[in-house]
Structures are given as structure tokens and as C-alpha cells.
Image (tube, rainbow, N blue to C red):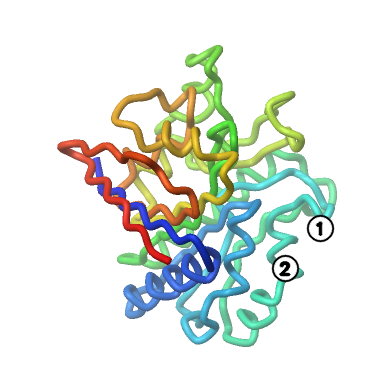
């Protein structure tokens, strides 16, 4: 069990989260850093980050991917067309690319990306892995979809201790069903620190379930944050009550 902190901002949430990313990178500035970014709303935060905190010691990749060469779908391509990407390249930031190569199948990408991550860690002993995560209304995070109907399938897909990355078909669970994602084992054991970005009142009930003291990860994958080392939640959602646990500290800080 790790530590969860919740920071709530009524205004300027994206900029506050971006500042937190920049502070986190500065905190580990003497070490190589692998920054892993989820798709969706979390990607928007990169454009607000402080460019000077990104340099040659930092490698950027996604935390989950959609199997597509469409820039409107593929998460890495969405980074590649952003203002952040151009500035990052000027500052000699490195990237682990998850765009499909010619004739590359979905499992090929999963194997290549997993190899790249393992190689990065082998080449950077003492390096830090930090993540910028998001949360869907259904409780999915990092491309890991909920399987309330079948815990066994969920465990087979995401709980294998030998796999850091998996390719799978989410079928009707998402509008982009062909997914490549890091696993729950990876989130728990490899990521050193994470920021979870949650915005929108439509996610209020799911955020409450995510922070509740009890619940199943296969039903609400975002609950994996309780098993990660250190997570800070940035949200514009005001919760009535945030539960405390003996082994997981949860604090909500309200700010304007």
C-alpha cells in the first residue's frame, strides 16, 4: 500500500496538474526519468508543463495505446502533434514510440514497447518512472477496462506478473477496442509516482468509488491507485467525504 493525496481546484485544474508534473520532474532532476502519459484528457496537461523541466535525461512515452495510425486516435501521435512535442524535441527529450510500423500487428507493438521499457530501465539503473494517468466514467484507467462480469478474464489479461504490456480487444467496452496497455503489475511495482487527473462532474460517483476504502479492481480498475506507491489525484470535483485507511493515506485539499 502507498499514499494517495487528493487536491481539488475549482479553476485552472489543467495548469495546476501541469505544475505538479513539472515539480515532480524537478524533484528527480538528478536522475533519468521515464514519463508515461495516458490518453484522453491527461494528454492536454503536457501543453501546460514548464518546458525548462524537460531535457535529455527525460524519456517520454504513453502509458496506454490505441492500435491505430490515425493521429486522432493513436495516443503517441496526439503527443507528436502537440506544442509540447516540438518544445520537448528542442530540449533533447527522448521518446519511446508506439505508432504502428508497416506490417506491424498489435501484438508486435506490445512486444516492442515492453522491450523498450525494460531496456530503458536496464540502461538507467536508479532511474525513476513517473506517470500521468486519467480515469474514464466507467472507472477504466491506463487503457485497462473494467470486467465486473468476469474477474478471471481481468486477471488473465492484466495480473500476469511476467507481463508489463499486453495487447487485447476490449470489444464493446470502448469506442477504441484495440488496446495496448501497461498492466496492473506494472502500475504497482514499476511506477514510482503518479498523478491521476480527473475532471468533470459526470465522474463524481466513480471518483468516490475510486477513493472508497473497499472495492474490486476488476470492477473499477482505477482502484489500482490504492496499490501503487504514491499517487496524487488532481480534480475539480468536490467530494462530500474522503475515507481514510490505516495503510493508505487519503487527504483532500480544497483550493480556489
Where disc 1 sits, the SS reads loop
From the top left corner, tell me how far across and down residue 39 is, in percent. Answer: 63, 52
Which of the two residues, 208 or 30, is positioned nearer the viewer here?
208
Residue drawn at x 48%, y 42% as measured from the top left: 164
Residue drawn at x 31%, y 40% as measured from the top left: 242
For the C terminus, give its image quadrant.
bottom left
In the image, taking residue 59 as reference, residue 174 lies left or right, namely right
**Nearer-N-terminus badge (1/2):** 1
From the top left corner, tell me how far across and down residue 46 is, in percent. Answer: 59, 69
Residue drawn at x 68%, y 65% as measured from the top left: 79
Label of residue 116 in the image: none
Please determine whether, in this image, residue 114 is positioned above or below residue 60. above
Q: Residue furthest left?
A: 246
From the image, tell me which residue sits under label 2: 80
In the picture, residue 7 is in which quadrant? bottom left
Q: Cα distance, mark 1 to mark 2?
A: 9 Å
Q: Are marks 1 and 2 in contact (CB under 8 Å)?
A: yes
Please determine whether, in this image, residue 134 is positioned above or below residue 138. below
From the top left corner, tell me how far across and down residue 18 is, in percent. Answer: 50, 70
Residue drawn at x 50%, y 34% as measured from the top left: 206
Label 2: how many Cα within 10 Å (few below 14, some 14–19, many 20+): some
Which of the two residues, 60 or 194, is positioned nearer the viewer here?
194
Where disc 2 sits, the SS reads helix
For the N terminus, give its image quadrant.
top left
Please determine whether, in this image, residue 159 is positioned above or below residue 180. above
From the image, tell me which residue sits under label 1: 71
In the image, taking residue 191 as reference, residue 245 lies left or right, namely left
Amino acid at each position: 500500500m502507498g499514499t494517495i493525496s487528493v487536491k481539488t481546484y475549482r479553476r485552472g485544474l489543467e495548469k495546476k496538474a501541469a505544475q505538479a508534473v513539472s515539480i515532480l520532474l524537478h524533484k528527480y532532476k538528478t536522475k533519468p526519468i521515464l514519463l508515461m502519459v495516458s490518453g484522453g484528457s491527461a494528454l492536454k496537461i503536457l501543453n501546460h508543463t514548464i518546458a525548462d523541466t524537460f531535457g535529455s535525461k527525460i524519456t517520454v512515452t504513453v502509458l496506454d495505446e490505441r492500435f491505430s495510425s490515425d493521429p486522432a486516435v493513436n495516443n503517441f501521435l496526439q503527443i507528436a502533434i502537440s506544442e509540447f512535442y516540438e518544445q520537448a524535441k528542442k530540449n533533447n527529450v527522448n521518446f519511446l514510440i508506439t505508432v504502428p510500423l508497416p506490417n506491424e500487428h498489435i501484438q508486435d507493438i506490445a512486444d516492442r514497447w515492453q522491450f523498450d521499457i525494460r531496456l530503458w530501465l536496464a540502461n538507467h539503473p536508479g532511474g525513476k518512472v513517473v506517470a500521468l494517468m486519467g480515469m474514464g466514467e466507467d472507472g477504466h484507467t491506463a487503457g485497462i477496462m473494467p470486467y465486473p462480469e468476469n474477474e478471471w478474464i481481468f486477471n488473465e489479461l492484466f495480473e500476469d506478473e511476467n507481463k508489463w504490456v499486453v495487447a487485447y480487444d476490449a470489444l464493446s467496452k470502448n469506442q477504441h477496442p484495440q488496446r495496448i496497455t501497461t498492466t496492473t503489475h506494472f502500475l504497482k511495482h514499476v511506477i514510482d509516482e503518479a498523478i491521476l487527473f480527473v475532471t468533470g462532474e459526470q465522474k463524481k460517483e466513480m471518483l468516490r468509488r475510486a477513493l472508497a476504502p473497499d472495492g474490486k479492481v476488476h470492477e473499477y480498475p482505477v482502484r489500482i491507485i490504492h496499490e501503487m506507491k504514491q499517487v496524487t489525484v488532481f480534480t475539480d470535483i468536490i467530494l462530500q467525504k474522503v475515507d481514510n485507511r490505516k495503510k493508505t493515506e487519503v487527504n483532500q485539499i480544497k483550493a480556489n
